[in-house]
Image: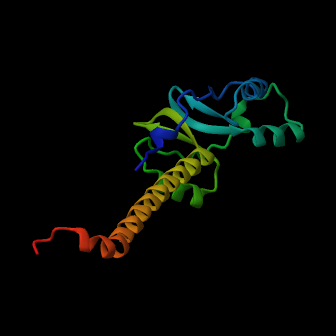
Amino acid sequence: MARVRDVMLDDVPTLGKEAKIGEAARLLAGRGTGCIIVAEGKKPVGIVTELDLIRNIVKGKSLKSPVSGIMTSSVVSMSPSMKLDEALKTIDIKKFRRYPVVDNGELVGLATKRDIVNAISDNVRFHRNIQNAVLVIFVLFEFFVFVLFRYLYKYLPLGS
């Protein structure tokens, strides 16, 4: 079974708590991740999504304010060794779209709902194709045994 490490993004955009909202906006605009992890050293302490940024700018928050004022600080993380079905359960329970991947307290990646769902979907599609191939082989075998064998029986030397 695939694991979170197989689908996670390794190059995670991060900022410190003292960084300004304007820096976060520039970093988000330049990356396709949809979020920035706020970290102290290598430990994630918050997350800022595009939606967080927009909501706070619309509310009149200054771009010179610290990013710690708009971050979500209850960070739900995943382990790189977590199986994808376990990760999907976490997604179903927590309802977030992006999760920092943490190993021994250090940020090592970013997992998204889309990447996890797509990986599981690809896995299901692969297994369905295997099942279809086995079914075709079984049908061909039955065809040989029940149809062709009846006609070939009289031509086979079976010790008579």
In the image, taking residue 107 as reference, residue 68 lies left or right, namely: right
Check the image and tell me how it is coloured.
rainbow
Q: Would residue 60 be found to the left or right of residue 119 on screen?
A: right
- At which x and y percent is residue 62? 85, 30
122 up-or-down from 157: above or below: above
The quadrant in which the C terminus is found is bottom left
The image position of residue 159, as x and y in percent, is: 10, 72
Return the x and y of residue 11 as percentages of the image width and height. Answer: 56, 26
**Image-based side of 82 in relation to 58, left or right:** left
Q: Which one is nearer the viewer's eye here, 48 or 128?
A: 128
Vertical order, 83 against 42 (above or below): below
Q: Residue at x 57, y 37 (%)?
A: 45
Give the vertical position of 154 relative to 133 (above or below): below
Image quadrant in which you'd find residue 79 = top left
Residue at image x 64%, y 51%? Answer: 96
Seen from the viewer's position, the closer of residues 14 and 33 is 33
Q: Taking 144 as reference, is 63 left or right? A: right
Q: Give whichever of 89, 154 is nearer the camera.
A: 154
Q: Please tell me which residue is depicted at 50% across the width and 56% down the height of the picture.
A: 124
- Asked which quadrant contains residue 55, the reply is top right
- Residue closer to the observer: 17 or 111: 111
Total numbered badges shown on the rendered structure: 0
Residue positioned 57% across, 61% down in the render: 93
Q: At which x and y percent is residue 27?
A: 72, 25
